[in-house]
Amino acid sequence: MSNIPHFPLMIAGLSKSDADKAEVYSPYNDQLIGTVDQANQADIDQALDTAYGLFRDRSKWLSTVERIEILEKAIAMMKDQAELLAVGAAEEGGKPLADSNVEMARCIDSLRACVDVLRNDAPATVPMGINPASQHRLTMMRKEPIGVVVAISAFNHPLNLIAHQVGPAIASGCPVIVKPAEKTPLSCYRLVEIFHRAGLPPEWCQALLTQDHHLAEYLATDSRVAFLSFIGSARVGWHLRSKLAPGARCALEHGGVAPVIVAEDANLDTALPGLAKGSFYHAGQVCVSVQRIYAERSVARELAEKLADAADKMTVGDPLSDKTDVGPIINKSELNRIASWVQEAVDKGGELLCGGQTLPFNCYAPTVLFDPPATAKVSNEEVFGPVVCVYPVDDIEQAINKANGLEFAFQASVYSRNIDTAMLAADRLDASAVMINEHTAFRVDWMPFAGLKHSGLGTGGVPYTMHDMQIEKMIVLTSKGIH
């Protein structure tokens, strides 16, 4: 038990030994891998008081130079510890080690993007001297931090999501309180420790865990909070938005269904590797993983069978093995839900081409369903598991209509060798991004990333998040010396 890491509450000025402890288990083998102290309401109030008091005292604000130095030191430390951080994330979240290594590299890229914005985002100006009223004036738009940021994160990217939520807050000069996902808090605490060791005063980035949803809501909706960054379910996200204090901003990142359109002229052999990776990456537990493929009827069966063949060849199991393609589901209840949804789809007439099996160690076999009915849950809701449905359609128009009929809208893709077909779909699809001849899970960390409809509010991606975490203050200088 002594080798099990323990993390206390990272609340500035707080030292306590009597906190309730949350235990963190590997989703693969159910072994205890860490413990974390849980916050009560008094702890949350102390964190909020500290952050709000810090923001209100401008003498304590960090300069741009200081923020750049801290972020660069943190980046260097993360590079040195990248292997250990990736292993830890794979262990607690179940993402295969090869993919966790990629996530760790993206985490560093995200923080580097924060530095790039600070170095290159010059103040804007507003034209003056263009009419009599604006003569002899000069303006400058100065960016200032919006205030206290609360970041509530999700389990599926325990390193890079924290980088995307906390990094922009630090870069923007906002005190931030982060509540990691209950299943994957250890990676978050390790990253926050690195920020502190890099020179960030502890009060600028505090971390706390609570498994009490009422306390999480209290934290997110308190009047001292100026910005909420939430990654999680649509039900919770929209509820929190309705409870925010007047004037508070929010960014909500919910689920998606990631529709893919495959035209009859698509090169299936070229498309297949990306579709397979985009479908079963992190066991489909990603908001933009491929879930629904609308393929023109002449190629639908061939595509589905080729995808099933690729799925059958994937290695499922231990996330710490470098040979594993698909790791475990995050917990037993989610595993059971996925299995029941697949069984329902088959019972209602969907054709099971591969998978459909619960495997040892909380794993589920990569599954391809052909033409499940519209009444099945897999056709109506976000599966969030290693399940892909292929639907034959009569033409591209029908595919677009089916994709646009879904309640969620995030990223989409279209495969075609005809530029007119591809651009028609890109123009007509309800999506914040449309990939052409690329799977829906493509992302680099400086590009915009936004959910539409039920999928969220606001735009992610480092430069866009930093913009939302800042306010623009216009300074107008009047002088007869200005012509």
Image (spheres, grey):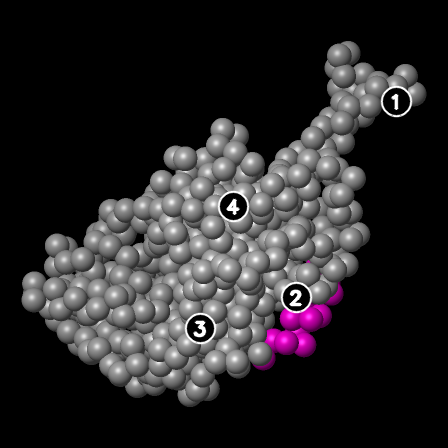
At 79% across and 52% down in the image, what residue appears?
A: 65
At 22% across and 64% down in the image, what residue appears?
A: 337
Q: CA distance from mark 3 to mark 4?
A: 28 Å
Q: Secondary structure at mark 2?
A: helix
User: Is residue 315 shown above or below 431?
Assistant: below
Q: Quadrant of the C terminus?
A: top right
Mark with earlier residue (4, 1): 4
The amino acid pointed to by label 1 is Ile
At 71% across and 50% down in the image, what residue appears?
A: 118
Residue assigned mark 2: 194
The answer to whether 372 appears left or right of 151 in the picture is: left
Residue depth check, mark 2 versus mark 4: number of the one nearer the observer: 4
User: Looking at the rendered structure, which numbered label has been put on residue 42?
Assistant: 4
Q: CA distance from mark 1 to mark 3?
A: 61 Å
User: Is residue 52 shown above or below 370?
Assistant: above
User: Looking at the rendered structure, which numbered label has been put on residue 482?
Assistant: 1
Estimate how packed mark 4 is, as few (under 14), some (14 to 19) or many (20 or more) residues with alpha carbons within 10 Å.
few
Q: CA distance from mark 2 to mark 1?
A: 48 Å
Residue assigned mark 3: 92
Residue depth check, mark 2 versus mark 1: number of the one nearer the observer: 2
What residue range appears in magenta? Answer: 71-83
User: Is residue 94 shown above or below 141?
Assistant: below
Mark with earlier residue (3, 4): 4
Tags 3 and 4 touching, CB below 8 Å? no
Q: Position of residue 338 (x, y in %)?
A: 23, 67
The amino acid pointed to by label 3 is Glu
Residue 22 appears in view: yes
Q: Give the dominant element type of the magenta stretch: helix, strand or loop.
A: helix
